[in-house]
Image: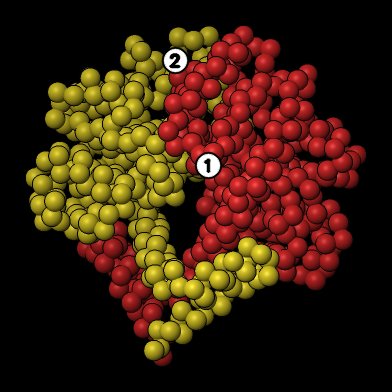
Chain colours: A red, B yellow
């Protein structure tokens, strides 16, 4: 499919072209960069919401419920499910199929899974590009759901305006440890599965943690009790997302975040492109392969070799 | 502390200097690179074992038990605990304190935690550097434990010779999804907490999954039943680690891995250094800050700006 056809298709709301672009993004196809570059000026309109939390905390159900609520409010929705540990992509996950069922006849909802597809490092970049594609496609709200704990969760902040961290009553010690790192990224806490014993206790615990947080800014993350099964608390949650977005806008943080994201993205792109440029002059050349062998044999060290090759590369620009 | 003093201290087995170096690595201090560069030729002797798996699968206890078993075999041990979601480092975690207790009087065991310490992207690199430091320090075996699921787990492969993936009987659906991605990185599966109901069933399940794996090489990952509390299965597990290492050596994979790691490391270092070089010419300059503003306002797109700035940078080398 040509760049032209993809750009036009996406801007005129064709789902097939959007799905195709996301596949190209996952494959790191050069066409994807070109299309994204062309679409860039049509982005920046969507409200981006990250949903993260430990496995089993009901993120998928919650995302489905939030979608239903936004559809009631006549907002269109895009859903991106990120699972760094899954080799699946393109809607193969169980969670997607369930969501598909509920929203499959609704043209105003677009759902997509992103797995690792073999290569890992690129998932965070691919997710950010996919969100951008859905933004250009015209969805009002984009929900980014990340499975599991760790680095990938924290990378959600860089994409999202509002980060929702989910938890369930009575989760154990390991979860407690996770909390420490996740604390800082939450704009809204959700204690899901409110019908389980210990739900109120969990809310109290999180509030207590928040009360001792020294680094908190002017937004104090609320803790909301929900039930993905019955829908309890979902209206309140969506109201809170809207409130947080209004807070970002009025406090000047929306603008500051926009600048920060633009900087990060530009610098990541430059890093990627410049490194590719350097490596294209090195890979496959006998001197380069030999240097790697010397490093493996501990006859050279990688730090010294890296300095030397970069100097040579930069000097070569003179020729 | 001077580069000289750190290098000498570490090569002569001083724990204080090793701990100091790891802190410098975490802080991305320039001295750390210099020390590591000097130590590089003294590395490559340690057997590096990654231990990963979902929260609550008893990784910490398992690591302690493996350590005890290796100490019985008169091997010295280094332990690096990686927790991408924790802001703590330097041995502040509960798991460490427990380990410290058991091995704290043993000079042949070195334990260290690595958390995010505020910045995230650098954790994987910092872990790899810390393992190298412990290797140069002279430990025979280095255990790298990663908490949680996701990208960080998979990054362990790049460091470890042998990857142990832990699981527990009766873990739920979300865990099942994690399994898909983790399958490929495991050299040995451990079903821990063998006294829980469903332990044998879990072993059968994993074996069944392995039997349908199309991409498997000549090493068929064994599934071992252990009990971190009683020590059951630990001797067998350590025997299996040794067997896997012997397999790597005899099949030529040890050498191939060494080359791959050297290549990856060299390329990562070049990426890091070259990007730093580029950014030092840009950051803070009014034209650069202005370009970022134009991107945020969607009047320019980051792809085009990245291309332009890189071209300008490379041309500048001519002047």
Dot label at residue A154: 1
Residue tagged by mark 2?
B193
**Residue B205 placement, left or right of B66:** right
Instruction: Decide: is B99 above or below B267.
Output: above
From the viewer's side, name the closer residue of A44 and A12. A44
Q: Residue furthest right?
A: A105
Give the number of callouts. 2
What is the crowding at mark 2: few (fewer than 14 residues within 10 Å), some, or many (at least 20)? many
Label 2 and label 1: CA atoms lie apart by 30 Å
In the rendered image, residue B159, in percent from the top left (x then y), is placed at 37, 46
Quadrant including the N terminus of chain A: bottom right
Eye-nearest disc, 2 or 1: 1
Image coordinates of residue B200 in percent, x first then y, are 52, 14
**Near-viewer residue (A219 or B280):** A219
Query: Looking at the picture, does residue B291 appear above or below residue B16?
Result: below
Q: Residue at x 39, y 62 (%)?
A: B272
Element at badge 1?
A: helix
Q: Taking B46 as reference, is A191 left or right?
A: right
> In terms of image quadrants, where is residue B177?
top right
Name the spot of residue A109 as percent of width and height, x first.
83, 43
* Quadrant of residue A95 within the rendered picture: top right
What secondary structure is marked by label 2? loop
Residues at discs 2 and 1 in contact (Cβ within 8 Å): no
Badge 2 and badge 1 both on one subunit: no
Residue at image location 46% in from the left, 34% down from the top: A181
């Amino acid at each position: 499919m040509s760049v032209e056809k993809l750009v036009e298709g996406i801007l005129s709301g064709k789902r097939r072209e959007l799905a195709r672009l996301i596949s190209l993004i996952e494959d790191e196809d050069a066409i994807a960069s070109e299309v994204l570059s062309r679409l860039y000026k049509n982005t920046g309109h969507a409200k981006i919401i990250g949903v993260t939390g430990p496995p089993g905390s009901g993120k998928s159900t919650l995302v489905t419920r939030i979608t239903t609520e936004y559809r009631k409010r006549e907002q269109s929705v895009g859903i991106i499910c990120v699972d760094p540990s899954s080799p699946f992509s393109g809607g193969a996950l169980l969670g997607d199929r369930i969501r598909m069922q509920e929203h499959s006849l609704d043209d105003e909802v677009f759902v997509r899974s992103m797995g690792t597809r073999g290569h890992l490092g690129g998932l965070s970049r691919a997710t950010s590009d996919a969100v951008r594609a859905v933004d250009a496609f015209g969805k009002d709200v984009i929900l980014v759901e990340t499975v599991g704990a760790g680095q990938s969760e924290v990378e959600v902040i860089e994409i999202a305006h509002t980060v929702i961290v989910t938890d369930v009553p009575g989760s154990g010690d390991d979860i407690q440890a996770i909390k420490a790192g996740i604390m800082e990224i939450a704009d809204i806490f959700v204690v899901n599965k409110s019908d389980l014993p210990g739900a109120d206790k969990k809310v109290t615990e999180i509030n207590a943690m928040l009360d001792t947080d020294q680094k908190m800014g002017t937004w104090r993350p609320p803790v909301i009790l929900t039930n993905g099964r019955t829908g309890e608390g979902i209206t309140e949650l969506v109201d809170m997302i809207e409130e947080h977005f209004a807070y970002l806008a009025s406090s000047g943080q929306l603008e500051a975040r926009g600048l920060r994201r633009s900087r990060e993205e530009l610098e990541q792109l430059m890093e990627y492109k410049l490194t590719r440029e350097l490596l294209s002059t090195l890979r496959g050349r006998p001197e380069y392969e030999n240097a790697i062998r010397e490093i493996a044999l501990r006859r050279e060290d990688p730090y010294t070799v890296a300095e030397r090759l970069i100097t040579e590369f930069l000097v070569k620009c003179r020729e």
